[in-house]
Image: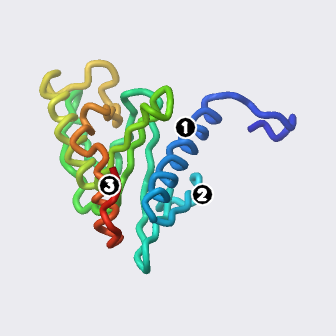
Amino acid sequence: MDFASGGLTMGKDYSRFLTGQMGESLVVAELGRNDIVATAFSGNLPVADILAMHGRRTLRLQVKAMRKETATIGLGNLLNIEQRGPKQIVTKVDPLDDPDLIYVYVYLGDCLAHVRFYILTLRDLQDLIFDGYMGYLAQNGGERPRNKESKHASVATKDLEAFRDNWDLITDRLGAPSVMR
């Protein structure tokens, strides 16, 4: 937003904000349809995007919304990357800050009928990213072909497919009935 002129700037940050807002709202709505109270914080809390509650149990959720089939992810909190010349030596961050934190990736699609949810833990995400990143480096002789020092990777919906509609991860933690689709 451009507060100085009193108008909205339709730039990258605005689009990113809307993408996040849509993802969080869709997760809150899906949880609500299944008797789980949830509220989104729209980026105002560093430790959670959504707080979900059932009975006396609460759960923090991180939401990552995707407009495309792939999303870029920073590797700093998941992988240790040591640069040795042009090659990268990669190990998993251990211990993770919160390995059981639940992430919900939301592919927005082009309409509501095409929205997809992928639910996994931070540890699951780390394993997925590590395996994919190591495979990528192996295909390229241990080097990133373009930006040798990059500490970013991508995650694709096809890589997340095993976690599609894994709502039981949330309902089990909350002690809620498993009525999600």
Q: Position of residue 24 (x, y in %)?
A: 52, 49
Cα separation between marks 3 and 2 = 24 Å
Disc 1 versus disc 3: nearer the observer = 3
Front one among 73 and 81: 73
Tell me which label, 3 or 2, sits earlier in the chain: 2
Q: Amino acid at mark 3?
A: Trp
Which of the 4 image quarters holds residue 176?
bottom left
Q: How dense is the environment of label 3, judged by Cα within 10 Å: few (below 14), some, or many (20 and up)?
A: many
Horizontal placement of 40 versus 98: left or right?
right
- Marking on residue 44: 2
Name the colouring of the figure. rainbow
Q: Which residue is mark 3?
A: 167
Cα separation between marks 1 and 3 = 21 Å
Is there CB contact under 8 Å for labels 3 and 2?
Answer: no
Say if residue 97 shows up in the picture: no
Q: Residue at point 74% right, 38% down?
A: 1
Front one among 131 and 63: 63
Tell me which label, 2 or 1, sits earlier in the chain: 1
Q: How dense is the environment of label 2, judged by Cα within 10 Å: few (below 14), some, or many (20 and up)?
A: few
- Marking on residue 133: none
Q: Which residue is mark 1?
A: 19
Front one among 127 and 49: 49
Cα separation between marks 2 and 1 = 15 Å
Q: Amino acid at mark 2?
A: Asn
Q: Residue at point 43% right, 27% down?
A: 68
Which of the 4 image quarters holds residue 94?
bottom left
* Residue that sits furthest to the bottom in the current view: 56
Q: Amino acid at mark 1?
A: Thr
